[in-house]
Structure formats: structure tokens, C-alpha cells
Image (spheres, helix red, strand yellow):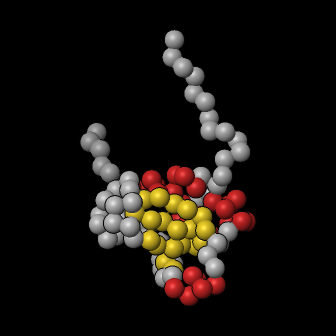
Amino acid sequence: MPEPYWPKKKGSYTLADAAKVSRYAKLRCRFCKTERYYLVEELKVAFGNVECDDVPYRNNWRCTSCGNRNMIDLTIVNPSAADLQKIKLRRIDRILYIRRVIWRDE
């Protein structure tokens, strides 16, 4: 007998919850050790209100330095004022929607 489908637990930690607590998300590549900082609110705009653990695996994110997939870790951080002056923040410039036409024969 197949096992039933169990939905994710109701108390999951989403981007909306992270936006209440912190303002920045740090994505770090485990291979080349590069770090990128994003605003949690902008990640929520880009991906919707998903779990924080699912963000690095959405749309098969690649590291911009080394090009590896599935090597990115997400951490919600509150950097100090000295660290805020050093970091370079990535912001949304624009969101492009691609419209594809798929044809079928009749």
C-alpha cells in the first residue's frame, strides 16, 4: 500500500516570517566561498512567500562566480553597522516574463 502524501508542517519558516525578523539574506557558495547579500523583501517579490530553505533551489540558481548548481546556502542575517558598510547589496533591477507559444497539430 503506498504511503499517503503528508503536506509540509504548518509552522514552516517563510520569507514573510524572515522579513519580520531580519532584513538581509546571505547566499554563500560552498564551492568558491563567494557571498552575496539580498533584501528578504525582494526575494519575496521574486519567488513569492516560499520557505527559506527552498529559495536556493528555485529556478536552479547557479553561483555567478563558479557556475555550480546546488552549492548555495541561504542564511538570514542581521549584519552590524560596520559590516553593512563593507557588503555589496544585490537589488532587483527588473523582472522579465517570458511568453512562449507551444503549437500542437490537429
Which residue lies most toward the left here?
Answer: 105
Residue shown at 32% from the left, 51% from the top = 102
Quadrant housing the C terminus: top left
Residue shown at 52% from the left, 52% from the top = 54
Q: In this view of the protein, can residue 45 be seen by the observer? A: no
The location of residue 74, given as percent across then percent down, is 51, 60
Judging depth in this view, the residue of 64 and 76 nearest the camera is 76
The location of residue 50, given as percent across then percent down, is 59, 54
97 left or right of 23? left
Judging depth in this view, the residue of 4 and 56 nearest the camera is 56
Q: In this view of the protein, can residue 52 be seen by the observer? A: yes
The location of residue 33, given as percent across then percent down, is 38, 67
Residue shown at 58% from the left, 55% from the top = 52
Which residue lies most toward the bottom here?
Answer: 85
Residue shown at 45% from the left, 65% from the top = 28
Residue 85, picture quadrant: bottom right
Judging depth in this view, the residue of 14 and 27 nearest the camera is 27
Residue 5, picture quadrant: top right
The location of residue 49, given as percent across then percent down, is 62, 57
2 left or right of 100? right
Q: How many marks?
A: 0
Vertical side of 86 occupied by 66: above or below: above
